[in-house]
Amino acid sequence: MRLIVAIALSCVALWTGCVSLHSKADSRETVDKYRPHWLPATAQMIYSSRWEDGFLGDATTKVKARVTAAEFESAVKKLELTRYGDVPKSSYGNEPPQWMSDSDKRWDPSSELDDTFIRKQGRWWQLAKYQNGFLYYESVSY
């Protein structure tokens, strides 16, 4: 009986992908060549990272790129983001937006939200800001 249970559990683990030696939940991929489709071709990539938990659907993407103010405004329009102060606080629910930290020193947005543009759709947040000539973008789903 124990053997049947062990085999059944192994099959379930294989089916759900839990047997991977490198679980997606534990991996964080830094890809400096990752370029979002909405980023202008003239933007200089400084930093990008992506993390995904394939089982739960949680994901985080961070991008830092050197852009002009006009290019930043164009990206905000493409992403349909709204200035943080223009959105009623009640629409955030119990989870207000925030800039996540990172151990990589290239990821250095200020934590203030006053100059941040946001968009929330269900469990998905997008944040962007223009600071010191850089576009900072963060996408988080949980």
Image (cartoon, grey):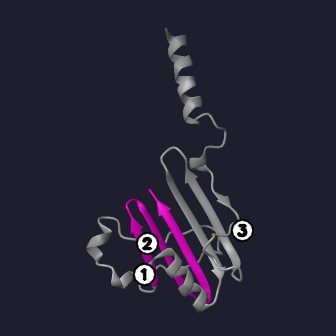
Residue 124: mark in rendering: none
Label the magenta part by its dominant secondary structure.
Answer: strand
Queried whether the magenta region covers residue 136, the answer comes back as: yes
Looking at this view, name the residue that lies furthest to the top.
1
* Lower sequence index among marks 2 and 3: 3
Label 3 sits on residue: 32
Q: Is residue 72 visible?
A: yes
Q: Secondary structure at mark 3?
A: loop
Label 1 sits on residue: 113
Return the x and y of residue 123 as percentages of the image width and height. Answer: 40, 59
Image point (39%, 81%), residue name: 84
Whether residue 118 is situated above or below residue 93 in the rendered picture: below
Return the x and y of residue 33 as percentages of the image width and height. Answer: 73, 67
Magenta-colored span: 116-142
Queried whether the magenta region covers residue 117, the answer comes back as: yes
Mark 1 → mark 3, Cα distance in angstroms: 25 Å
Mark 2 → mark 3, Cα distance in angstroms: 23 Å
Q: Amino acid at mark 1?
A: Leu
Image quarter of the C terminus:
bottom left
User: In the figure, residue 106 lies in which quadrant?
Assistant: bottom right
Is residue 1 or residue 41 the one in the foreground?
41
